[in-house]
Image (cartoon, rainbow, N blue to C red):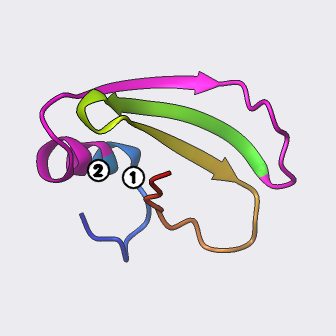
Amino acid sequence: MEFNRAYSRDEFLSFLRVNFLPEDFKQETNDIDNPINFKYTQQVTRLGECESLGLIVYEVRHSSKHRNNPKIRID
């Protein structure tokens, strides 16, 4: 995956499955209700879960004028 190109959900999910996360990553694509209406948040989508890492992957679409680069954040 090249992070200097425009974001593609399919390319990002392929990167997660093939190169980044363990084999137990379960892909799903579910829009979720955003309980907190942030100023620029438009849509939140759950992309999958990796149980062995306790990791849930979300895609957040926003209306900010800043670039839409993918971010990986682990809490």
Q: Which residues are magenta?
A: 13-40
Rendering coords of residue 21 (x, y %): 20, 45
Helix, strand or loop for disc 2: helix
Q: Depth check: 1 or 19 in front?
A: 19
Q: Depth check: 56 or 29 in front?
A: 56
Residue at left offset 38%, top offset 30%: 48
In this image, 29 relative to 67: left or right? left
Rendering coords of residue 8 (x, y %): 39, 52
User: Residue 26: within the magenta?
Assistant: yes
User: Residue 18: within the magenta?
Assistant: yes
Rendering coords of residue 15 (x, y %): 22, 51
- Quarter of the image for the N terminus: give it: bottom left
In this image, 34 relative to 37: left or right? left
Residue at left offset 60%, top offset 73%: 67
**Residue receiving disc 2:** 11
Helix, strand or loop for disc 1: loop
Image mark for residue 8? 1
Q: Give, as a three-letter code, the residue at label 2.
A: Glu
Give the tally of numbered discs. 2
Q: Are marks 2 and 1 in contact (CB under 8 Å)?
A: yes
Rendering coords of residue 25 (x, y %): 24, 31
Image mark for residue 21? none
Would you place residue 23 above or below residue 4 in this image? above
Residue 18 placement: quadrant: top left
Q: Residues within 10 Å of mark 1 (few under 14, many from 20)?
A: few
Q: Give the distance between the C-alpha atoms of the residues marked 2 and 1, in whole angstroms.
A: 5 Å
In this image, 33 relative to 57: left or right? right
Residue 72 placement: quadrant: bottom left
Residue at left offset 18%, top offset 28%: 24
Q: Give, as a three-letter code, the residue at label 1.
A: Ser
